[in-house]
Image (cartoon, rainbow, N blue to C red):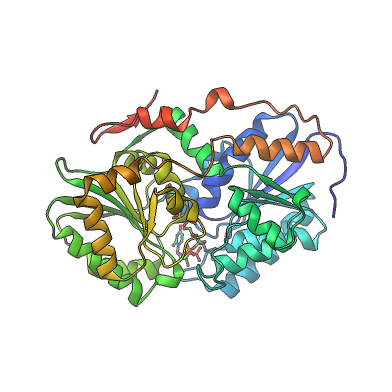
Amino acid sequence: MSPNMINAPVRAMLVLGTRPEAIKLAPVARAMAASPLFEPLVVTTGQHREMLHQMLDLLQVPDRTELDVMRDRQELSTLTARLVDGLGEVVRDLRPDVVLVQGDTTTALTGALAAFYEHVPVAHVEAGLRTGVLDNPFPEELNRRLIGRVARWHFAPTPRAAQHLAAEGVPASEVLTTGNTVIDNLLWVLEHGTGQDQFTTTGLRRILLTLHRRENQGDTMRGMGRAIRRLADRGDVEILLPLHKSPAVRDALLPELTGHPRVRVVEPLGYLDFSATLAACDLVLTDSGGVQEEAPTLGKPALVLRTTTERPEAVDAGAARLVGTVPDAILAATERLLDDPAEYARMAEAGNPFGDGHATERIIAQLAEDFGADADVPSTEAAVPSTDQVIARLPEGPGSYSTA
Ligand code: UD1
Ligand code: UDP
């Protein structure tokens, strides 16, 4: 499938349904809205509800098409069916020139399918991530492989992601290494927004924790919760957990973590507060994809509480460690980082391998060129500080973070 050459603006449908998709497509929506070459058509599926809504201001696009598919404890099969059905209708209605999907969620997979069924070409943002294990993460590894079969443009965040696509036979002409748009957004937010970090104590080591992956829910996640509680028993840490809305995550973690004086469980944070909290923490324990990318950007060591990662670049750079999900291993790795200043410094100074904050420009310049629109896409360079500048401005202690 090759795109039709058209006169600008290119009508680009951006499909997003979960928190990370909103965060990672926000810079694309903002750049398209500011460009005469594009008309962004934002479609929110509502796969997430509160956690999506609290991110939508980042897009700065007021008019959206909204579906409302979320159900309590939704099953993947019914969610998928509702999304293909709803998104098919939206594509027929909007008749976009291109559909952009991001990452590996059910929204992304069904957005790609719905576009394909209507003969609309698909652009995949954050293409080529792989663990090599089909059911880990579940179901995201399958989703991204399937989107890779459908997409016409593969915007790979790193050279390694581009290599995965080449190894699967995707023509080089369809792959562009761009960096990850999460970095564009983080740097933009730290430059333009103000947030309040959510730690409440001074003098303790501050640990930011996020957990949600489906493959760990149940006993594994309960064990992770117990490990965190033992960690908090050390007495010299404050652990902050902005808790994912998923009832399965809450069922696993709340019984283990409620009531400990040094574990603070809060509702999911808006992006401004979350990024301020990340900037103010000492280290991160996470199973999140996005947080694995953001932590090294801010010089925060990340311990990845999973058995696989599709983001080995941070591990290779020394900024992250893949710790697994076994309680003793989680405890040992965290204590080592807390007690060994040299190890801590090595990780904190390893740097960010996920991009320079200009992924969005590369993405929309490529689309503009391929649609025959004027390829002179305005640079956002002046608006985005470098990672070094951002790290240099991080606060020394708790408090609000603002560069304004
Ligand atoms: C989804 C993505 C995952 C991504 C994560 C980001 C899939 C298959 N998984 O996982 O790749 O890392 O989002 O957080 O697409 N819920 C609410 N309110 C919300 C959001 C969720 O109540 O705002 C509850 C719903 O009951 C829902 C459950 O959380 O049933 C799980 O949400 P779902 O989108 O199915 O999966 P996630 O685990 O969030
Ligand atoms: N995040 C947020 N508030 C929170 C927790 C996370 O804004 O309370 C952001 C975080 O900065 C990152 C993204 O959400 O950009 C990650 O989302 P999540 O972990 O849900 O999904 P994943 O990245 O694993 O797909």
Picture quadrant where residue 120 is located: bottom right
Q: Residue at x 34, y 58 (%)?
A: 243
Number of labels in the image equals 0
- 292 lies left or right of 141: left
Q: Visible in this render: residue 69?
A: yes
- 288 lies left or right of 376: left
- 169 lies left or right of 183: right
Image coords of residue 157 (percent x, y): 59, 47
Image coords of residue 45 (percent x, y): 60, 56
Residue furthest to the left: 235
Q: Residue at x 58, y 26 (%)?
A: 381
Residue furthest to the right: 5
In front: 186, or 390? 390
Quarter that holds the N terminus: bottom right
Q: Is residue 39 positioned above or below 253 on the image?
A: above
- 268 lies left or right of 122: left
Image coords of residue 266 (percent x, y): 29, 53
Residue furthest to the bottom: 219
Q: Is residue 22 positioned above or below 392 on the image?
A: below
Q: Residue at x 43, y 65 (%)?
A: 213
Picture quadrant where residue 326 is located: bottom left
Q: Residue at x 26, y 33 (%)?
A: 399
